[in-house]
Structures are given as structure tokens and as C-alpha cells.
Image (spheres, helix red, strand yellow):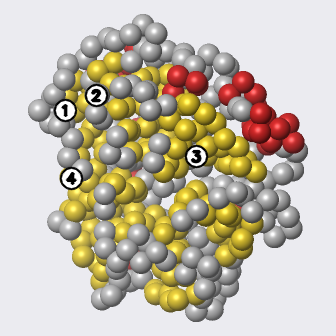
Amino acid sequence: MRIIFYLPIVVLSAILFNCKFEVNDQNKISIDISKINRISLLEQFKRVELIPLETNSNSIINHIDKIIYNNSKYYIFDRSQKAIIVFTTEGKFLYKLRNVGKGPSEYLLLSDFEINRFTGNLELLSPFGQLLTYKTDGTFLRSIRLPLSLKAVHNLQFISKDTVVFYRKFESNRIVLFDRESNKIIFETHKIPQTLATKWAGDNFPLFCIDNKVMFYEGFSNTINLITTNGSIINYSWDFGKKNININQMPDGKKYETDYVKWLMNESNPQFIYPFRIHLENNEHIFTSFGSNKDMTYLFFNKSSHRYQLFSQYIEGVNFPHFALCRFGDVYLSAIDPLILYDYIKPQFLDSKNKQILQSVKKGNNPIIVKYYLNPNFLK
């Protein structure tokens, strides 16, 4: 993906509160953080749909860490159970993949999973340096042990069928490109300060893919990076002016332990846009969320119109979920626990069918898949 940025900031409709961005010669997208507004959820999304996930003794979910929607199935990663739990598009339970142990098809822990877009297989990553492959029906195919230098890996994506990008949360060189066929490291890159490497454990799932290009973001950085077979480069970065975070200015040495929190999160006068919680992107839109003035701020950005919108809460008094969030096409998809569902959904957003679903949700049920369908005219 190549994005050309060139338009100046312009304040648009007072009704929509959206803006155009300005980019300098280094692909920095300038955002005016003062333009945070409360808007209606119905301005952004044309409809909201609820999909209850079947609840039985085999399908119970403790916590959803990651969702992948693929071929009309929801693949749910529950790290606490060390399991992938699979449901149909209607929410019917299919099977649970949980092979904990020390056998050839087993693992002790899971840190991430992906569906290999080149093979269609499930790829499971153990942080202890093990990569396991299953068919999407749960049939085991193979497992490999990674080199000893990759004994602590946490996230994965695929550049080709057997070329894997690993993200490491506790190393200075965060990115590793690995060839599975030869079981060899191609290169290590993206070096960060050692003090940050030991204190910042990284983000849950920083790697993502657009048009077969693998990119990543990090909570402490406003840059979006592209990984190639030659290394990693900055694809673009957000520019918040004086609120940009600069990790090179972190306190280090003896002062580091005592001054780190004060420097990073000055509660009396927040200095930085920090941390970036989530990043979703396709060829049309970018969605990201970050900390700003003690609040969670959301940024929607339209690549075609070059307009963006900042908000913290909807005028209806509900929030937009920033957890267990994924996207396919123009649909944003999350999974919300019944106990907090009304913090994100109001009956006025729903048609009669989905209102009945909302009323039928009970405490103790599995999380509810919430599908937000983007308004086609939003930020056009």
C-alpha cells in the first residue's frame, strides 16, 4: 500500500466535526487533537447487529483476546484457556481446539494465532518457540521447534506460505523474519532502546496485513511500519505536534526506575498521545485509538477523502469498543460481555429483531458478537 498525503488541514462541517489532514514530506499525517467531539453512533454506522455465541459446557469463553472472521466462521482466541474456539457466522458452536501437553501436536501456552492466507491453515504460536499448524477443522498437520534464539516469541504474520514475521515483546530487536522450511532466521530488525525493551512488554497483537503487505504498530510509537524482505521501514506516522511521544527522550540509568511513570504518564498535565491501543486499516479507512488527556480517543480516517474524525464518547452515552476488535470489509466486529453490553449498545441503534436479542441476553452467557456496519457516506 502506498498513500500520498498532501492536503492541508481544513475544518469541515460543524455537524460532522471532521477534518482534512496535512502531511509533510516524510509521510507524517498531521492531526489537530483539539478537534475531539462527541458525535452520534448513527452518523458513523448505518446499523448494528448482535450475534449471541452459543453457550454450553464445551463452548464457554473466559476471555476473548483476539477474533478472526474467516469463511463465515468466528475464530476466538481465549488465552486463559489456551484455546481457539470456533463458531459459525450465526454464532453456533463448532469446536474447541485445545491441545495442552508435551506431545507432537500439543503446546504448553499460546500467545497468538493466525489463519495463513496462503494455505488457509490455522497457525498457532507458543511463546516457548513452537509453531503448530492445523486445518481449520482442527486436524493437526505439523509442529516445528524454532531456533533457541527464538524461544520467546509472541506474535506472528505471514509474508509468504513459509516466511513468517515474529514480534518479540521483551527484546530490543522486536521484529524477526523467519524461514520455516529451512528453520532459519533471515534477519532481526526494529531495534528499540534497551530500557524500553525491558519495561514495555509490547502490544497484544501489533502485526496486521493489508494487500499481502505486513505492517505493525506499537503502543509507545506514533509510526506505522512496513516489513519487507529487506527490513522494516516507516510507512507513515501520526503527527500530533507537541504531544508526539519521543522514546529517545525517556529517562534512563539510575533515574529510569523512579522517573519512568512520571515521564510517560504525567497525570496532572498529560504530555503525550499515548498509548496506542488498537489499529485497524484497509485500503479505505484507518481506525486507531489512543490515550489523550486521561481519556480514550478514537480516530477514524478516510484515505480517499483525506478527512478524519476524533471522538471519545458518543452523544448517546455509549462507548466504542477498543478490545477484541477486528474488521472485514465495512464491518467492525467486537465481542462484548453481557454484563457491560449496555455500555456500548442502546435499543435505539437496533431493529426489532436485534432488540429482541438484546432483551434476551442473560448474565453468564458467552460474549455477544457486535457488528457495526459503516455508513457508506461517512467522511466522504
N-terminal-most mark, 4 or 2? 4
Q: Residue furthest top?
A: 14
- Which label lies toward us, 4 or 2? 2
Residue furthest bottom in the image: 104
Q: Which residue is mark 3?
A: 333
Q: CA distance from mark 4 to mark 3?
A: 29 Å
Q: Which residue is mark 1?
A: 5
Q: Circle 2 sits in a helix, a strand or a loop, which is it?
A: loop
Q: Nearer the viewer, residue 299 or 380?
A: 380
Q: Residue at x 87, y 42 (%)?
A: 360
Task: Tell me which residue sits at (31%, 69%) in the image.
Answer: 159
Q: Nearer the viewer, residue 16 or 100?
A: 16
| Within-10-Å neighbours for mark 2: few <14, some 14–19, many 20+ | many
Mark 1 or mark 2: name the one nearer the start of the chain: 1
Residue at image mark 4: 233
Query: Do the residues under discs 1 and 2 have CB atoms within 8 angstroms?
Result: yes
CA separation in Å, label 1 and label 2: 8 Å
Residue 24, horizontal then vertical, whole percent: 15, 28
* Element class at badge 3: strand
Q: Which residue is mark 2?
A: 306
User: In this rendering, is residue 211 above or below 274?
Assistant: below
